[in-house]
Image (cartoon, helix red, strand yellow):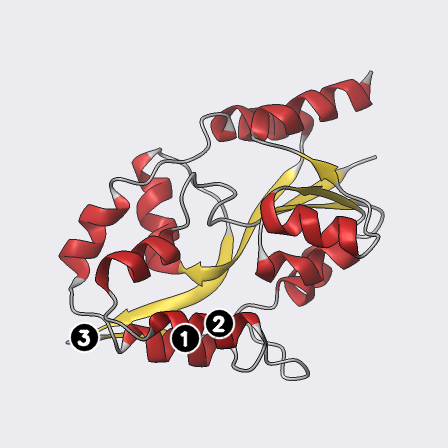
Amino acid sequence: MQKQFFIDFDGTVTTRDTVAAMVESFAREGWQELNQKWENKEISTEECARRTLELFNTDLGELEKLLDTIDIDRYFPDFLSFCESQGYQVYILSDGYDFNIKHVLSRYNIDLPYYCNKLLYTDRFDIKCGNTNPDCDSCGTCKTNLMQELKMPGYQSVYIGDGYSDTCPAEHADIVFAKSSLLRYCREHGISAIAFDNFSDIIKYLQSEDR
């Protein structure tokens, strides 16, 4: 059966979460409390991000230098080559920032469609969320809605992720590959998920499935 892959970016494609790296590197004290409120679903991604970005004391140049230190999963290019050989479509769905995704992927000459929040910068940073779900207002980018909109009839939706913003799409995908907190969530809530450490594990699983 033909498959479509929907993949989280931060901590899944990358070996380090780019948004977390930004916050840890540039934010003044107070971001921890905001992050805890976000994890408790007391505030939305947009509110948490905007208030956290107000604590930043940096510019785009410094952000680029930070992003240059963040690598992708070493097997991700192999995974993309495998998907291309099989005719599988791949999309990145992220609750992170377009600037980060574009910068990191360009370093590896990877060109993929991605949906995420927009990072704005004039004399300070801000966020624009263009893919929210008005019925939920939790994430800045509703991955579940996007996955359902992009999925073609008769195709299997495969979701790959690692964290909080991946829990909802994991509940709606046909196949789930999970690690870290997403894997724990799936196990705690009875969601069928295939554990993985890196994209080599996913390639091996897909190859064995095709035999």
Kind of residue sitting beneath label 2: Gln
The residue under label 1 is 33
Depth check, front residue: 38 or 137: 38
3D distance between C-alphas at marks 2 and 1: 5 Å
Numbered circle sitting on residue 36: 2
Depth check, front residue: 32 or 78: 32
What's the residue at 77%, 19% (across, down)? Answer: 208
Tell me, yes or no, whether the two marked residues, 3 and 1, touch with CB atoms within 8 Å. no
Q: Secondary structure at mark 1?
A: helix
3D distance between C-alphas at marks 3 and 1: 26 Å
Against 174, residue 199 (above or below) is: above
Numbered circle sitting on residue 121: none
Depth check, front residue: 186 or 134: 186
The residue under label 3 is 122
Against 3, residue 145 (above or below) is: below
Q: Quadrant of residue 20?
A: bottom left
